[in-house]
Amino acid sequence: MAKLIKGIKMEIYFYIIIFIIGSLFGSFYTLAVYRIPKRQDITHTHSYCPNCNHKLGLLDLFPIISYIFLRGKCRYCGEKIRPRYLILELLSGVLFVIIAYFMGLNFQNLSFMKVSEFCFTVLYLTYIVLICGIDKENRKINKFVNIYGIAISIMYMSYLCIVEGANIYRYGIYLVFYILILLFDTITLKKFAKSTYTIGILFMILTMIVFTNEYITISTIIFTFLAMAIYILLYKLKNKLNKNVKTDRQISGEISIGFFLGVTNIIIFILMLIYNYYIL
C-alpha cells in the first residue's frame, strides 16, 4: 500500500513539473507573439514592460504566480497586464499535462521514444501557437515561424525514418512538396517583392500533415471551414445590428485563417489522443 501511495505521489510531482514547464512555454509564447512581428530578439533581450519599457525583475517573470501577486499590473508603472497572458500560461500548462498523460508519458515510462514523441509534439505546439497568435494579431503568416516549422518537420521526419523505421517514401513525398512550395514562394517573392498569405497557409497545412497525419489535417480543414462560416454569419449579424456595411469580400479578407486552422488542429489532435488512449 505504501508503495502504491509513493507511486501516486511521484506521478503527481511528475505532472506538476510538466505543468510548470508548460506554463514557462506559455510565457515564452506571449513574448514571442509580441516580438516576432516587430523583428525583436526573443532569446537574448531581457523582458520588459511594453508600456514603460522598464526591465522586469526575476520576481516579475514567474508564470501565473507573478500575475496573481502583482494583481495583473506592472510593478513599475501600474499599467494593467492583459489577462490573455495569464490565460495562455494556464492553458499551456494544462495542455502540456493533457498531452503527456494521453501520450502515456509518466514517471515510470520515461522511454527514449516516449520522451522524443513528447518533445517533438511540444516543438510542433510551439509552431502552431506562434502562427495562431501572430495571425490573430496581424493577419499574417510569419515567414520566420514557417521556416522554424519546416526545420522541425525535417527533424521529425528524419527521426521517424531512422529511429522508428517509418516509410521513407511517404516522408520523401512531403519533402518534395516542401521544396516545390519553397520554389514557388521564391518565384513569387522575386516577382512581387512579397510572400503571399496563401503560401504561408500551404506551409502550415503541410507541417500539420507531417506532425498530425493526413486524417487529422483533413478533419482540421473541414471543421475550420465550418468555424469560419459560423464566424462570418455572426460577423454579418453584428454588422447589421450596428448598421455597418461591409461586403463579403471585405469580411473574408479580415479572417485570420491561420488562427482558425491552428486552434482547430490542436483541438482535434487532443481529441484523437484521448480517443486512442481509451479506445485503442
Image (cartoon, rainbow, N blue to C red):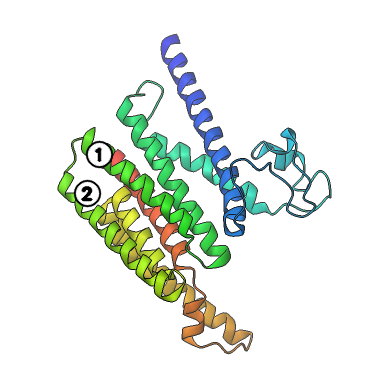
What residue is at 37 percent from the left and 47 percent from the top? 151
Which quadrant: the C terminus?
Answer: top left
Image position, residue 55 (x, y; %): 76, 42
- 236 or 48, which is in the foreground? 48
At label 1, the amino acid type is Leu
First-in-chain label (1 vs 2): 1
Name the element at disc 2.
Answer: helix
Tell me the tag on residue 41: none
Q: Which of the 4 image quadrants contains residue 38?
A: bottom right
Residue that label 2 marks? 171
In the rendered image, the residue lying farthest to the front is 190
Classed neighbour count for the residue bearing mark 1: other residues with Cα under 10 Å, few (<14), some (14–19), many (≥20): some
Which quadrant: the N terminus?
Answer: top left
Height in image: 28 above or below 200? above
In the image, taking residue 129 as reference, residue 72 lies left or right, namely right
In the image, taking residue 236 as reference, residue 67 lies left or right, namely right
- Count the numbered circles shown: 2
- 201 or 107, which is in the foreground? 201
- 34 or 177, which is in the foreground? 177
At label 2, the amino acid type is Tyr
Marks 1 and 2 in Cβ contact (< 8 Å): yes
Image position, residue 212 (x, y; %): 31, 50
Image position, residue 268 (x, y; %): 36, 54
The answer to whether any part of residue 278 appears in the image is no
Image position, residue 232 (x, y; %): 48, 77
Name the element at disc 1.
Answer: helix
Residue that label 1 marks? 160
What residue is at 83 percent from the left and 45 percent from the top? 76
